[in-house]
Amino acid sequence: MKKVTLVLSDGMKFRGKSFGYDAPVAGEVVFNTAMTGYPESLTDPSYAGQLMVLTYPLVGNYGVPPFTIEKNGIPTFMESDKIYASAIIVSDYSANYSHWNAVESLSQWLNREKVTGITGIDTRELTKVLREHGVMMGKILFDDEPDNIPEADYEGVNFVDQVSCKQVIRYNEGAGKKVVLVDCGVKMNIIRCLVNRGVEVIRVPWNYDYTGMDFDGLFLANGPGDPDMCEDAVNVIRKQMDMSVKPICGICMGNQLLSKAGGAQIYKLKYGHRSHNQPVRMVGTNRCYVTSQNHGYAVNAKTLGADWEELFVNMNDGSNEGIRHKTNPWFSSQFHPEACSGPVDTEWIFDKFVGYLK
């Protein structure tokens, strides 16, 4: 293991050792408080451009599952085709793993995909810094390469364009009701949750004009970065809403894009929500759900148009967690009902959406 240093944009340094691919890297430093699920998190396209800090101290002890594809074309255990996080930062990496489904170590996987991993960092102290000061840019430098200094930007970069598919892809073709899924960086379990409910999924690029296609419902997927970089997608959503009242559902980035189409403004959270235990209340009720989340931006619900209202609210900080139209079957969640990883308490959202299809 080579000696490395994590340098934050405010000058603070954390020293550790490399256990992944030996290459300096830069990105936005964010933290995730989940206890499990690093294969799913690393392959979540929403982490593009980010250095992912795991607060749970022991990481790697259950290894990495195989990359296999189901008959429906969906990866069995991963959320995409590769690792999208720029790096993973942990406190205590376990080189020895034990799990019935593991085929390699986390270190072997990171090396194969050329992704940096560092261990020996006090991730809870690092998290306290990020909570106090907010997320910030950081660089992982190798002590034996002092002049090899990476550069990266996060603000002003359209990461959605980088991770979205480039052509139309169909799943469960000919199954019945057709759902157009706008791919802003979709997690594969979202597609699985729709396919398992007997619909055909037509996955299109983030800025694709689908308004002339034959479909029964529209699904807006998750994705990385700033939703204000995705005006093309918002314009197509507005066009669709002007043409039809076909059902629309959004998740994460999809909630933000639907909100923007409904007139709302977006703002950046101080340190985001990335965990398996975010409490969310359905507005107008005392019903509370434990949810899986991964986002750094939120909807300013006060700026929603008159025809829209909040559907869910975060119980920790009061931020918006979903919206709905007052008359049309258009609704969304900021959290991830498909989880993967995390609790599946809110998977009924897919049932609600599919139930609207006519």
Image: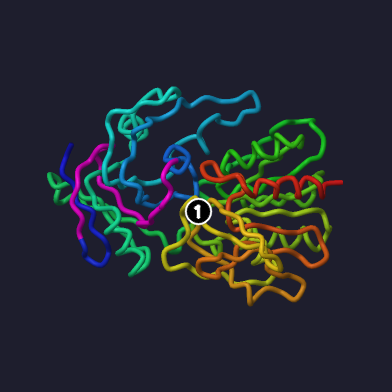
174 horizontally vs 209: left or right: right
Q: Give the residue at x 83% y 58%.
A: 245
223 horizontally vs 149: left or right: right
Q: Which residues are magenta?
A: 13-36
173 horizontally vs 339: left or right: right
Q: Position of residue 73 (x, y in %)?
A: 62, 28
Total numbered circles: 1
Query: In the picture, residue 155 is in which quadrant?
Result: bottom left
284 horizontally vs 357: left or right: left
Q: Residue furthest front?
A: 286
**Magenta stretch containing residue 17, yes or no?**
yes
> Which one is nearer the viewer's eye here, 277 or 339?
277
> Which one is nearer the viewer's eye here, 297 or 321?
321
Q: Secondary structure at mark 1?
A: strand
**Magenta stretch containing residue 146, yes or no?**
no
Mark 1, residue position: 277
Query: In the picture, residue 165 is in which quadrant?
Result: top right
Query: In the picture, residue 279 is in which quadrant?
Result: bottom right
Q: Residues within 10 Å of mark 1 (few under 14, many from 20)?
A: some
Residue 93, compared with residue 244, is above or below; it is above
> Which one is nearer the viewer's eye here, 86 or 230?
86
Residue 68, compared with residue 57, is above or below; it is above
Q: Position of residue 353 (x, y in %)?
A: 75, 49
Q: Hey, what amino acid is under mark 1? A: Asn
Q: Give the residue at x 63% y 72%.
A: 301
Q: Residue furthest right?
A: 358
Q: Position of residue 211 (x, y in %)?
A: 77, 52
Q: Position of residue 183 (x, y in %)?
A: 61, 47
Q: Give the residue at x 28% y 28%.
A: 96
Q: Quadrant of the N terminus?
A: top left
